[in-house]
Each structure stands twice: as C-alpha cells, then as structure tokens.
C-alpha cells in the first residue's frame, strides 16, 4: 500500500473521529422539550412549551444564509460579540430555520428555499436554554433579536441526510399529505430543524420539517 493511500486512510480516520466527537457532543446537549401527542412512523404531532429564541436573518441561498446566521448566533451565545459581554450560553438542539416573507417588514439591521439559485430571506433561531428568561439573557448585538415563542402544537417529520433543497421539498410534501390524512389544519409556513453539527455524516444526522397546526384537531 502506497504512502498516499496511507495518508488518505489517516485523514479519513481523523475526519471520522471528528465527526464522532461532534455527533456525541450534539447528542449530549439540551434538546428542545416537547410532548408527543401522536406518533406514526417518522411523523409526530407535538405540543411545545413556550420558549425564548435568539434569531437573525440573512439573504441568499439557504446554505449561504445558514452559514452566516450560524456564525452570528454562535458569536452571541459564546460571548464573542456582545455589547456588555457576559458568560457563555450553552448550545441547545435543534437549530431552527425558516423562510421570511419578503412582503413583511423585518425589524433588523441585516435582513436573513427551495432552490440554490434563488435569493431568499432566511431566519435562523437558536433556542435559549430553559434556565434563562428574557430578563436574564445577555444583551445581544443589534442584528440579533431575542423573541418569545408561545406554546404551540406542531406536526413534524424526521429524516436523515444533508438536508438538501430537494430533501426538504420532499419532506414538505410528505408532511402535508400526513397532515391532511390526520384532518389537521396547518398554520403559517414550514420550518426546518437541524440537530447535528455540519461535520456529522449525513446518515447519522437528525433533521426535521415542522409546521404549526391548529388546536381544533382530535388527538
């Protein structure tokens, strides 16, 4: 076996090691709590308690906006960019993302699917650990907003992979069909939830497409 082959195997082993560490770390952090009302294969109907999120928006393809937004939110929670400093905030899972209606006004200094050639506006949200309140969270920089999300009922479909535009579109269709079969009434637009670090291999990743539904459906 040649030197290049051994180097390639070594680099591959390192990459797998890094991915394994990232996978273990993300599985060990606080996950957004919810109550499962109904479960059927990869679909779930859930009840979420109120939560606080730090959110930022960017424009561009979903992948470009994701990268920029993740870095900005990470700089806030890890105390790298704050007006008043303060301690680090623990990471939680999942990271939430949705497309912003461009017809709505966005009260942010730097506004953030389907198709990588489209230019859209995307919002990314980090869920704050449950121990924090709006009063106890550190003040964010101007482009990041802290928001309270009320309790809500959500339909979800879980899948693995890299969360490509095609994957998300396919999952939206499957979730829409399931919602219809359950006589549920959707509210708002689809959201995407990503539970793992980017270096985690696609087959090991947990991704979800979510959408809020009305409370009038039978359990």
Image: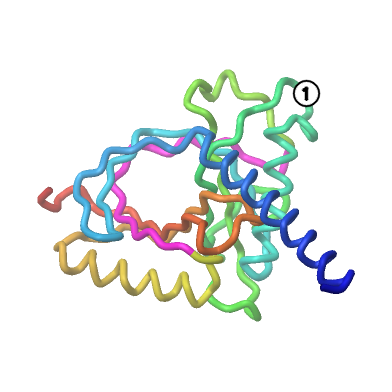
Residue 85 colored magenta?
Answer: no
Q: Which residues are magenta?
A: 142-160
- Along the viewing direction, whichever of 26 and 166 lies nearer the viewer: 26
Q: Is residue 100 left or right of residue 8?
A: left
State yes or no: residue 154 in magenta.
yes
The secondary structure that most of the magenta stretch takes on is strand
Judging by the rendered image, the residue that carries numbered circle 1 is: 85
Q: Residues within 10 Å of mark 1 (few under 14, many from 20)?
A: some
In this rendering, the answer to whether 70 lies above or below 131 is: below
| Residue 102 placement: quadrant | bottom right
Whole-percent x, y for residue 50 in the image: 38, 33
State which quarter of the image contains the N terminus. Answer: bottom right
**Residue 160 in view:** yes
Q: Which residue is found at the position 51% from the left and 63% from the top?
A: 203
Q: Secondary structure at mark 1?
A: loop
Q: Residue at x 65, y 70 (%)?
A: 61
Q: In the image, 6: left or right of 187?
A: right
Q: Residue at the spot x=38%, y=35% of the render?
A: 33
- Where's residue 14, x and y in %? 75, 54
């Amino acid at each position: 076996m040649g030197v290049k082959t051994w180097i390639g195997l070594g680099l591959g082993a390192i990459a797998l090691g890094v991915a394994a560490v990232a996978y273990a770390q993300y599985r060990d952090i606080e996950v957004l709590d919810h109550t499962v009302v109904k479960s059927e294969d990869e679909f779930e109907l859930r009840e979420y308690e109120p939560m606080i999120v730090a959110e930022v928006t960017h424009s561009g393809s979903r992948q470009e906006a994701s990268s920029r937004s993740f870095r900005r939110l990470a700089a806030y929670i890890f105390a790298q960019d704050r007006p008043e400093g303060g301690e680090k905030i623990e990471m939680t899972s999942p990271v939430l993302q949705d497309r912003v209606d461009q017809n709505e006004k966005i009260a942010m200094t730097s506004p953030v699917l389907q198709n990588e050639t489209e230019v859209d506006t995307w919002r990314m949200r980090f869920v704050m650990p449950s121990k924090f309140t709006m009063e106890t969270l550190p003040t964010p920089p101007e482009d990041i907003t802290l928001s309270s999300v009320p309790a809500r009922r959500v339909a979800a479909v879980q899948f693995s992979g890299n969360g490509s535009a095609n994957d998300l579109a396919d999952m939206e269709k499957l979730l829409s069909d399931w919602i219809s079969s359950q006589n549920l009434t959707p509210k708002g637009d689809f959201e995407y939830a990503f539970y793992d670090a980017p270096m985690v291999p696609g087959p090991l990743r947990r991704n979800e497409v979510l959408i809020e539904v009305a409370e009038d459906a039978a359990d």
